[in-house]
Amino acid sequence: MEQNHQSLKAFTILFQASQTIQDVVRKDLLRYDLNPSEFSVLEFLYHHGEQPVQTICKKVLLASSSITYVIDKLEQKRFVYRHACPNDRRVTYIVLTVEGRQLMDAIFPEHVQIIDRIFEVLEKKELNTMMLALKKVSFHTEEI
């Protein structure tokens, strides 16, 4: 019974920490008129170059019903554009525009600083332990 209470407590702490971190990131991204989903797509393209829509969905954990809306918004802001795959008409690639790359060049280092500030309270060993524990729980959860 004690393990169940510890598990519930761990879940609550994890959930609250996740919410708090997301709130800080969301607030930071609002300075650039971006939401976390838009930023996730931009960040993925920034680091991996043009990508098929399906790949973006999987990597940034967005539902296919949401990705179209996010990409539409990013296109309206002129940060990305679509282009059809020349070999497979079913595939559409998403590409950062010059404006999108310039935005990410400017804001990504600041984003890293915010993330660093969030975790600066932890020593390196504590951070590594936390990451290993969360990965372990994540992999185990996938099996359930």
Image: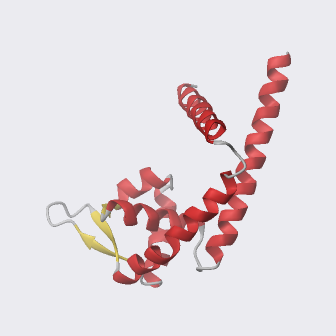
Q: Which of 105 and 95 is in front in this view?
A: 105
Give the total number of marks visible in the rendering. Answer: 0
Above or below, 107 against 140 in this view is below
- Report whether residue 79 is seen: no
How are the residues colored?
Answer: secondary structure
Task: Say which quarter of the image contains residue 5.
Answer: top right
Q: Residue 125, image x and y in percent?
A: 62, 36
Q: Nearer the viewer, residue 49 or 105?
A: 105
Task: Say which quarter of the image contains residue 68.
Answer: bottom left
Q: Residue 15, image x and y in percent?
A: 74, 45
Q: Residue 4, image x and y in percent?
A: 81, 22
Residue 48 placement, left or right of 20? left
Q: Nearer the viewer, residue 129 or 141?
A: 129
* Residue sitting at x 48%, y 77%: 106
Q: Residue 75, image x and y in percent?
A: 42, 79
Above or below, 122 against 52 in this view is above
* Residue sitting at x 59%, y 80%: 33
* Quadrant into which the N terminus falls: top right
Residue 89 placement, left or right of 42? left
- Residue most toward the top? 1
* Residue sitting at x 50%, y 69%: 108
* Residue sitting at x 51%, y 68%: 109
Residue 53 placement, left or right of 85? right
Q: Which of 12 and 55 is in front in this view?
A: 12
- Report whether residue 84 is seen: yes
* Quadrant into which the C terminus falls: top right
Above or below, 20 against 78 in this view is above
